[in-house]
Image (spheres, helix red, strand yellow):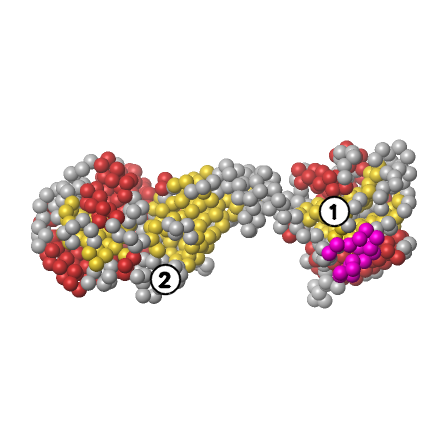
Amino acid sequence: MVAEFAVEVFQNEYLTEGAREVDAIVTVAASGMPAAGVAPVDIAQVVIVDCSGSMRYPPTKLDAAKKATATAIDTLRDGVSFAVVEGTGSARMVYPTHRGLAVASPRTKTEAKRAVRVLVSDGGTAMGRWLALADQVLAGHEGPLKHAILLTDGQNQHETPAQLSRTLASISGRFTCDCRGVGTDWQVDELRKIAEAMLGTVDIVADSRGLADDFRAMTATAMGKAVGGVSLRLWTPEGAEVRFLKQVSPTVLDLTDRRTEAGPRTGEYPTGAWGAESRDYHLCVRVRPAGVGDRMLAGRVSLVTPGGDVLGQGRVLAVWTADEALSTRINREVAHYTGQAELAEVIQDGLEARKAGDVETATAKLGRAVALATSSGNTDTAKLLAKVVEVEDPVTGTVRLRPRVADADEMTLDTRSTVTKRVGKGGG
Amino acid sequence: MTNCPECDEPVAAEDRFCESCGRNLLVRTTPVGGPDGTAAALCACGSTEIDEEGFCEQCGRAQPVGRDRMEFVLPTIAGISDRGRRRARNEDSMAFGHVHARGVAAIVCDGVASSERADEASQAAVDAANAVLVDALVEGTDPERATVLAVAAANRAAGALARAEAPDVAPSCTYVSAMRTDDGAVVGWVGDSRAYWLADVGNATPSRRLTKDDTWAAQLVADGVLTEAEAVNDRRSHVLSRWLGGDSGQVSPHVVALRPEESGVVLLCSDGLWNYLPEVEDLDAARTRGTTPVELARELTEHALAAGGHDNITVVVIEVGGGRGR
């Protein structure tokens, strides 16, 4: 493995006397991946296509889903293992027909696309069962990179939320899954829950004509991954408490509760598969305060492979000082991502309040979101917000709820609320 | 049979020089450049696991590195130099030597914080002075004359670090030294680093301070302008009137001789210690009797750290009198 993980820590390590909370942004940049990608034999991908009855309306929806699946199959590199699963109230193998994987070749790709073409929509929606079948199929794959795409257009009606949670708990960490909701009848919360558990992305494809491009991009990204099952290992000193560990770029993903103990004062958090990419994490640790002049290692962050190889390491420090000019300094990266995490939260809270008819709360939260998006230069989110609220003053966040909002606009804002703007490093 | 401290080859007790490397076996000194930082085997929290960057694997506390904490022990003399809690680095230095059957010599210099590279200045000064004083012990030179020569050498060494374009911040330091001879000790100083005589019993030769600070405040007290109490609180109390370094000119030390009638220790220290224990009574109250030099040095250093450690702390303890082994 030639992959290198460069770990950089941004923080103000100076604490005033008696202070105990240490914040740091940990930037992890993976590079040194083989130019041609990893060996195809290492990669497996399963596409899960929703074939519930609702996919018939409008009829173009299922057609678009089939086309997108065919595009995903075409994007597979020869030699990669793959399968297609049909999702309804249960789950069924589309290709290959046995519960296993096929090896991509011109012949198997043609066969798979033929099998996809004849899919019909009929039945319910039980995503946990779809994922369980994908898990069974992928379990037979020996390579390190396992990826699934889940496409749905509806709500998880044919199993309880508890059933889905149980399935997610048992398969989480075994493969990554990107989720796509087509149309506007699916639930953002539901797909977000799956994507977060499976360390994948979630997005809306309001217009099914966009599906094929999206599937191609997701598959290409999966083909570009080089290291799977990477964990973020965190050592903290005795008596310390990890207040939170969040991925904050490219999206907000709270990992705090995903910790598994890995030795004395050490825990591991899953980060999934990595290609040549960069992610930022916000770590907040509460340590035992030491005396003025003391230096402490408040955290050691390592990226480790499932085999325990350390790919990169960074240190989070704490230095107690009587110099207030030092201890009151605000770290730009920490401030930026604290704002981005709050942005995601106020958007979700605001939309929730709006749905519940609480105009006052919705206006306040979404107004705050507009102000945060504006001050941080998150123009993508600002644009999405402007479709849900009328902005009077973007700086103070003075807004009015729009009386009529397209479902697609609201769902797009909700789905993409966790997408953060990267902090500009160095200069402005 | 022991081993040569230089090359570890066996040497006989009567050898004056090592047969293998030629080292003078009768002379032992702190290394030039300062003792290695004490790589603490044990963190203050009790853990023995220290990572490669010097952080404790248990409590995370940074362990002292390099000049942060230096400790050195020779027969009848020991010293500690500690960064303290507030300063970013340790600008104090210490050096000492032990010459078999002749005596010991020790120097403490405190880098002047307002000068540049004050740590280099103090280290260069103690090393230069130590070489002169140890030679004087070997050759039997008069200790008072040796002290004057040592100060001149230290002044030249610190002065050599000055940059022509920055004379105002020429690396500078204070100086205090002691030479133990057959019948007592000779102390010399420039600046406000101090020497004290701490008697074991104190009936015949009571404990006392041996030095008078070269500060403007001390000068004003001596001239009757300020009282002792006023001087302590005066902002000029630490402003030096004399020092070593490129901008000091020719400096001759104050020299005093001590001939105690009983045993005790001579304590050399920087103001990082005496700020907390200024009077000899304070020192006598803070120390445990009957300890070894290194134990006493540690005890006093810990006292200053516990009191806040606002400045670098250097403590050198020399056993004197009472038929102590030379």
Q: Quadrant of residue B228?
A: top right
Residue at point 70%, 66% (across, down): B165
Disc 1 secondary structure class = strand
Quarter of the picture holding the C terminus of chain A: bottom left
Please give left or right for residue A229 compared with residue B285 in the image. Answer: left
Residue A90 or residue A67, whichever sits in front: A90
Type of amino acid at the residue the image marks with label 1 = Val
Residue B26: give its label.
none
Q: Position of residue A283 (x, y in %)?
A: 43, 45
The magenta span reads B9-26
Q: Position of residue B15 (x, y in %)?
A: 82, 55
Q: Tell me which residue sits at (72%, 67%) in the image.
A: B164
User: What residue is pinned by disc 1?
Assistant: B73
Q: Nearer the viewer, residue A184 or A309?
A: A309
**Left of A312 or right of it: where is B113?**
right
Residue density around tag 2, few if under 14, some if 14–19, many if 20 or more, within 10 Å: many
Q: How many marks?
A: 2
Q: Position of residue B32 (x, y in %)?
A: 73, 57
Q: Is residue A66 magenta?
A: no
Residue type at mark 2 is Met
Using the rendered image of the protein, determine whether residue A39 is visible from the camera's viewpoint. yes
Which residue does the image show at 22% across and 36% down from the upper left?
Answer: A163
Q: Nearer the viewer, residue B48 or A32?
A: B48
**Residue receiving disc 2:** A33
Q: Is residue B139 left or right of residue A168?
A: right
In this rendering, does residue A216 appear at all? no
Pinpoint the chain carrying mark 2: A
| Pointer 1 local density, CA inside 10 Å: few below 14, some 14–19, many at least 20 | some
Give the x, y percent position of residue B104.
83, 49
The span from disc 2 to disc 1 (Cα, nearest Å) is 54 Å
Task: Give the image quarter of residue A290.
Answer: top right
